[in-house]
Image (cartoon, rainbow, N blue to C red):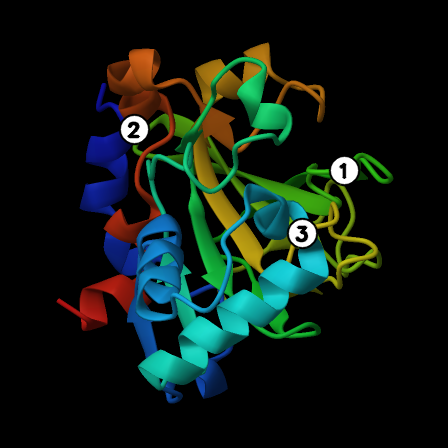
Amino acid sequence: MKNLSEALKGNKHLFSDVVPESFLAKPHKHAGFSEELIRFFQAHPDLEFSPEDMVDPHKCARLVEGVHREMGLAWSYGGYLEDRSVILQGSYLSELENWMHLGIDINLPIGTAVLAAVDGVVYKVDSDYPEEGGWGTYVILKHSMDGVIFYSIYGHLHKKALVKPGDDVIGGQVIGSVGDQSENGFWFPHLHFQLISELEMKSKENPFTLDGYGSKKDLAYLKENYPDPLIVLPMARAAE
């Protein structure tokens, strides 16, 4: 039987983008979240950097907007297995030193439609509100390809998802929208998109143990069980 990465690569032609087609026509770029924020502060020595700014959803939103404006972008995406130890010191991640980001962040305006990446079944719709630094409202879809079961996670959504558990969905179908800071886990507005193996999902059902970050010491395991979403998203292939 194929492993998850092999199944994804062999079926990437089946995947849709998770943002509306209208956004794909706007200026955008693959950009590391930590790298670009650090570069932004280095380019503006008059601005004081504080890790508290990163976990303040409104301050962070203004910083992301500043980065986009300076780069001439309407939106950006990236951050898979990015080490965020510099910018997220003092957050809940510090306790276990889980600094490695397991999905990608797609930095979009509040209210932007979020689309299913590929055909599947709605496995879970939940929220960990009012947990700070959590998922907010999130949707999990279940998929099967070449006998391999896996899941896709869409986090930091508006509190009203447009699907419910058990619904069949098709790639490109709208399943929700980007939430604001008061409902998305208290983050700056963005979509967290992550792929996860069946093995990992079975071990981390609870939203308080299912996380978007992992430990650097487990890097090989993380790569196997949380594969890079950019393997399959057309937006990344178009930029190649």
For mark 2, what is the residue? 4
| Mark 3 in CB contact with mark 2 (< 8 angstroms) | no
Q: Nearer the viewer, residue 82 or 10?
A: 82
Residue 78 badge: none
Locate residue 198, reporting x and y percent. 47, 21
| Left or right: 34 as drawn, with respect to 193 | left
Residue at image position (40%, 18%) is: 215
- Front: mark 3 or 2: 3
Residue at image position (71%, 26%) is: 207
How would you rate the neighbour count of disc 1 (Cα within 10 Å): few for under 14, some for 14-19, many for 20 or more? Answer: some
For mark 3, what is the residue? 187
Residue 178 in view, yes or no: no
Instruction: Calculate the distance from the C-alpha at mark 3 to the C-alpha at mark 2.
Output: 30 Å
Q: Nearer the viewer, residue 170 or 37?
A: 37
Locate residue 65, reporting x and y percent. 53, 75
| Mark 2 in CB contact with mark 1 (< 8 angstroms) | no
